[in-house]
Image (tube, rainbow, N blue to C red):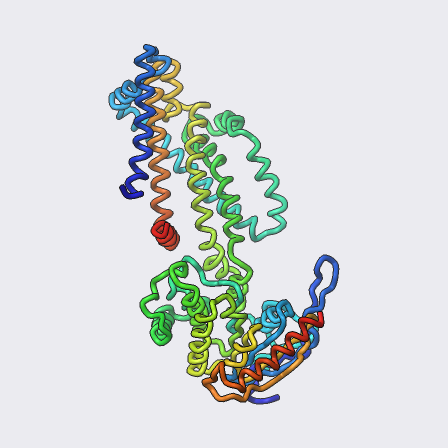
Amino acid sequence: MDATSSLRIEGVSKSYLQRSTLIAVLDSISFNLETATWTTILGPSGCGKTTLLKIIAGLEFPDTGRVFVEARELSRLGETAYLPQDDTLLPWRTALGNAILASEIDGKPIADAKREALDLFDQFGLSGFESLYPSELSGGMRQRLALIRTFLTHRDILLLDEPLGALDPLTRATLQNWLLNVWSELKKTVLLVTHDAEEALLLSDRILVLTDRPAQLQLDQAVELDRPRDRGSSELVSHKSQLLRLLLEEEVGT
Amino acid sequence: MTSRWMRIVAPLMLLLLLLGAWELFVRWFDVQPFILPAPSQVLVAFVANFTMLVRHGAVTFSEITLGLLLGGVGGILLAVVVFYSPILDKALYPLIIGSQMIPVFAIAPILIVWMGYGLWPKVTVAALISFFPLVVNVSDGLREPTEGAVDLFRSLGATRAQIFWKLRLPASLPTLFSGLKVSATLAVVGATIGEWVGSHEGLGYLMLQSNARMRMSLVFAAILMLAVLGLLLFGALRIIERRVLHWRARKVESREVSR
């Protein structure tokens, strides 16, 4: 296998039993993720994107198929940094306390973790907010904090489940730029789930489009646009309308 | 006037109004003190018998706090055990709820037979009556974290113990304190009932003795003392709660400002 491949998914399928009917969610999904690249999974809502992320994170098991991290097949709990879709900041911890959660779980020295977190806070415009509680932060700041926490896990693979989905368009655009900056500095392997075609085109090296349930890989496309990308550029707009057409066909087909 | 002042002044005004009406009623209709003493007579009795009230109050207060401590620790442990063991949950929960249908009044005499006239039967009654709100509240609190939060911890490789100490327990603290405050008021009831059934000291004992001797103003003075002790305990819990849940206090403050 490719030496720079950090994550490999091989023929992963998954079904759920719901009220005694078997619902197929994922249908033999396969792909590789190369180290330090940004890949985005795009698909109609409810198509099983979250299930796929959970399987990769080791939270759920595929019915068939295998997942390899750095060519090793193992329990992936503790191997990746998974950012769930719902708000997972701990309300009783300060912003700083939330940011260092992973180091605490790993049993690493707290003082080092705090120092490192403060650097990141400074770098990413959250300095001065370290001792505030999540309830005292705005939606955009909360999400930024959740992302900082994800970066501070020191895992090489980040699994982000619609991290900007609940934000207003302006905050969202700001955070997209911010996220790209952070990523280009830290060089992690990112797998982002979204249903926003523009977001996918702005951020990713590669886009995977899933079909509706049971999800199959419909399109695997490299995005060869120079960064930073302009959301108004004719190339991006034409790519976007292609992707939207593809997604729309899927929605209508159901 | 600020809302903070209103919170102190408003109930005080209402209380004075009610006491004034009571005083007037007793004087107007010339009610006998052994039927209903006037508030002023109760106050006189309270001051005159203060050392005695403190002595008996100390006994009752230790029964209340020990009972609350035992019932509290027991209730929290039971909630945790029931949370982590589905079998024990199914086996114990109906029994726990069933046990609450038995009035403590029925159990207190039995406990006197088993444990004698000392401190422990009262502590036991107070513990038995105060553990239930904690079982219910802590069970709910441990289920508070969302699936996403648990997933986050698990994906980071957190152990079950870490998920308990860093996620479930802190998440359960707000409901735990709500339960504790309910339990505190119940523990006062429990200790008093325990003393009524059989004792030679404590405010419950003092009430019964004074009642039998038609010293009604002393009965009321003992009730007043009991209320003061209950309020002290409640106030102490509120202070601890604010310390522990300071992250929550801030949220409440900002909400009040915006109102």
In this rendered view, identify the residue nearer to me: B102 or A185: A185
In this rendered view, identify the residue nearer to me: B147 or A66: B147
Residue A51 rendering spot, x and y as whole percentages: 62, 69
Residue A236 rendering spot, x and y as whole percentages: 53, 84
Q: Residue at x 61, y 51 (%)?
A: B86
Residue A80 rendering spot, x and y as whole percentages: 53, 74
In this rendered view, identify the residue nearer to me: A243 or A154: A243
Q: Residue at x 62, y 74 (%)?
A: A43
Q: Picture quarter containing residue A66?
A: bottom right
Residue B114 rendering spot, x and y as whole percentages: 50, 28
The mark tally for this picture is 0
- Seen in the picture, residue B70 relative to A197 is either above or below; the reply is above
Q: Picture quarter containing residue B64?
A: top left
In this rendered view, identify the residue nearer to me: B248 or B95: B248
Q: Is residue B110 visible?
A: yes
Task: Describe residue A254's horizontal placement relative to residue A130 as left or right.
Answer: right
Q: Picture quarter containing residue A210?
A: bottom right
Task: Describe residue B74's horizontal placement relative to residue B38 as left or right.
Answer: right
- Seen in the picture, residue B67 relative to A197 is either above or below; the reply is above
Q: Quadrant of the N terminus of chain B?
A: top left
Q: Residue furthest right?
A: A21
Q: Residue at x 46, y 71 (%)?
A: A172
Q: Is residue A104 visible?
A: no
